[in-house]
C-alpha cells in the first residue's frame, strides 16, 4: 500500500483525486467498491474528521478525497495521520483494502471565511 503525505490548508477546501489500475495499467472495476477515510492525531486517538469520498469516473477508476472548510477548521495541530480503506462488496465475504496512508501536514490559517 502506498504512503503519500498530504498538505492541507486550515479553513480551506482540500481535494485529492486518486485512480486505480491493475498491473497492466488498465483501470480497475470499482463499481462494487465503497470507500472511507479518516484523519487522526495518532493511531490511538479519536477520529478528527472523515474524508468525503466520491467516485469521479467508473471508466477510469477515479475517486476524489475531499475535506470542506468546515472539516479543515477542525485541524488545530500541524501534524496528523490518515488512511483510506476500500470495501469490495462483490465477493462473499467482503474484501477490505487499505489503499493509501500517510501524514497530514496542516498549514494553519489566519483568515476564517464567514461567508454564509
Image (cartoon, rainbow, N blue to C red):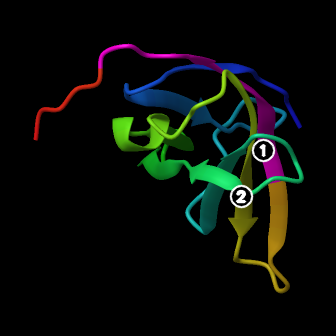
Q: On the rendered image, what quadrant is the N terminus found in?
A: top right
What is the secondary structure assignment of the residue under circle 2? strand
Q: Residue 8: x percent and y percent? A: 54, 21
Q: At x 45% / y 43%, what residue is drawn? A: 71
Closer to us: 94 or 114 = 114
Q: Which residue is mark 2?
A: 86
What crowding class fits label 2: few (fewer than 14 Cα within 10 Å), some (14-19), or many (20 or more)?
some
User: Which picture quadrant has residue 110?
Assistant: top left
Residue contact at pointers 2 and 1, CB within 8 angstroms: yes
In the rendered image, residue 54 lying in the magenta stretch gets the answer no
8 lies left or right of 54: right
Q: Which residue is mark 1?
A: 99
- Residues in magenta, as a range: 98-111
In the rendered image, residue 102 lying in the magenta stretch gets the answer yes
What is the secondary structure assignment of the residue under circle 1? strand
Q: Could one spot residue 107 in this view of the protein?
A: yes
3 lies left or right of 85: right
Q: In the rendered view, would you say 74 is above or below 10?
A: below
Amino acid at each position: 500500500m502506498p504512503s503519500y503525505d498530504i498538505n492541507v490548508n486550515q479553513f480551506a477546501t482540500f481535494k485529492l483525486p486518486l485512480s486505480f489500475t491493475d498491473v497492466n495499467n488498465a483501470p480497475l472495476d470499482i463499481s462494487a467498491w465503497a470507500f472511507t477515510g479518516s484523519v487522526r492525531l495518532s493511531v490511538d486517538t479519536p477520529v478528527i474528521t472523515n474524508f468525503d469520498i466520491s467516485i469521479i469516473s467508473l471508466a477510469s477508476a477515479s475517486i476524489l478525497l475531499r475535506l470542506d472548510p468546515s472539516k479543515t477548521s477542525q485541524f488545530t495541530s500541524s501534524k496528523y495521520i490518515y488512511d483510506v480503506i476500500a470495501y469490495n462488496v462483490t465477493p462473499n465475504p467482503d474484501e477490505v483494502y487499505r489503499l493509501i496512508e500517510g501524514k497530514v501536514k496542516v498549514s494553519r490559517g489566519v483568515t476564517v471565511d464567514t461567508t454564509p
